[in-house]
Amino acid sequence: MEHSYLTEEQREEWKNLKGNFTTTPNYFDLIIGIWNTISWYYRPHMWRDYSFPRSFIEDFTRHFYFPINQIYYILYIAIVITILRYLFEKNICKPLVNWLQLKPINKKKFPESAWKCLFYTCTWSYCVYLLHRCYNYFHEPYQIWDDWSPGMTVPFDIKLMYFVQCGFYLHSLYATLYMDYKRKDFYVMILHHVVTMTLIFVSYATRYHKIGLLVLFVHDITDIWLELTKTLHYLGSRENGKEYPMWENTASACFIMFTFCWFLFRLYWYPMKVLYTSGVVTAYRAYDKGCGLYGFFNGLLWMLLGLNIYWLVFILQFLFRVCSGTLNNLHDVREDEDEDDDDEDTKSMSSTVKTAVSENINKKKKL
């Protein structure tokens, strides 16, 4: 079915799109494919009557299929998740950390990581079920566009995943501001939550939900290992100064799995399965069916890749410190600045006390 909003020139340009896509892409195929499709998509004939922002708004509203009343479901889910986390931390985590006699700082961090580990495990398990039992989009992502049509009905099982995930990231914005432990990448986390929530919302409304399902699958697995690593690390030290190497060694093993999954899922499968399918295959198999917002949607996906590469710097920094022997145990490098500040405050306070004591001794000597 031809897109009713395409001009005759655009239809001819689409027919003249060079090359084709491959079902087994590599990084080279991604670069060449993106270059070919972008060169085609941004030709002058494709944008002859385009006027920003008017044309963008018209294009966005034309492809937008989201009943406003469904926003309430997302809000309700975000509220329920916030309440569940509060109850989980109060009734399970707080008694547990007190019983284990964790360090005061770890008592604050443990509930956050334990909650996120539990949530991501549940959602990723459900995502695995969808992609391996119900749909075949991971192994054959090019089939995503076979039955695509504007405003198509979203299956309930995928809709459930979408609403829960969107509600979770809406909750995460609130949690980052008021519940989570503050770290150096605070503003990056805010940006991450906004970009992710926008991607989830827009992909659902424009019926890119199958792509969105793949995005969730390749990202949530690393979050499970990260939060599990941090949770186990917090268990390694107690208030009485006693150390438990068993927990630290287990956390180290989990960090190795986290690093492996980061490279495999976020830096390999994400470009090959998601970016190639949305950026290259779309142009060949779905543009004539009405797939719009190509630049906007792919721009958000590439921004997410940029964030993955940004966090890779922290991972490599951590590995370098471990390999160079400057780090004895696992430690979130994003927290260095905060803890250094605490140390400086302690040193400053200690220095002030010593100065005051010294002055009092001198006064007594003079008397």
Image (cartoon, rainbow, N blue to C red):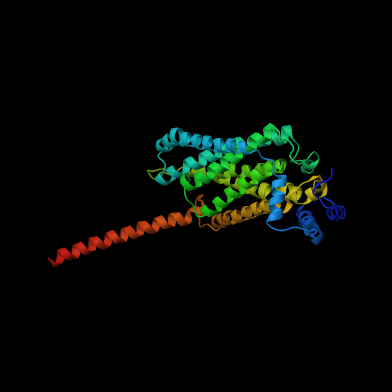
Corner quadrant of residue 347: bottom left
Q: Is residue 288 visible?
A: yes
Q: Position of residue 256 (x, y in %)?
A: 60, 47
Is residue 236 placed above or below 294 in the rendered structure? above
The N terminus: image quadrant: top right
Query: Of residues 250 and 170, which is closer to you in this image?
Result: 170
Q: Residue furthest bottom?
A: 366
Q: Name above or below for residue 186 compared with residue 87.
A: below
Residue 228 picture location, percent across and down: 55, 41
* 240 displayed left or right of 317: left
Q: Is residue 118 left or right of residue 63?
A: left
Say which of 265 and 37 sits in front: 37
Spot occupied by residue 321 in the image (x, y as percentages of width and height): 54, 57
* Residue that appears at 66% across and 37% down: 127
Residue shown at 54%/40% (left/top)?
116
Query: Image quadrant of residue 312?
Result: bottom right
Number of numbered discs? 0
Examine the rendered structure and indicate whether residue 100 appears above or below residue 281.
Answer: above
The answer to whether one can see residue 25 in this image is no
Answer with left or right where residue 204 lies relative to residue 236: right
Q: In which quadrant will I find the C terminus?
A: bottom left
Q: Position of residue 333 (x, y in %)?
A: 51, 54
Residue situated in front as seen by the camera: 325 or 210: 210
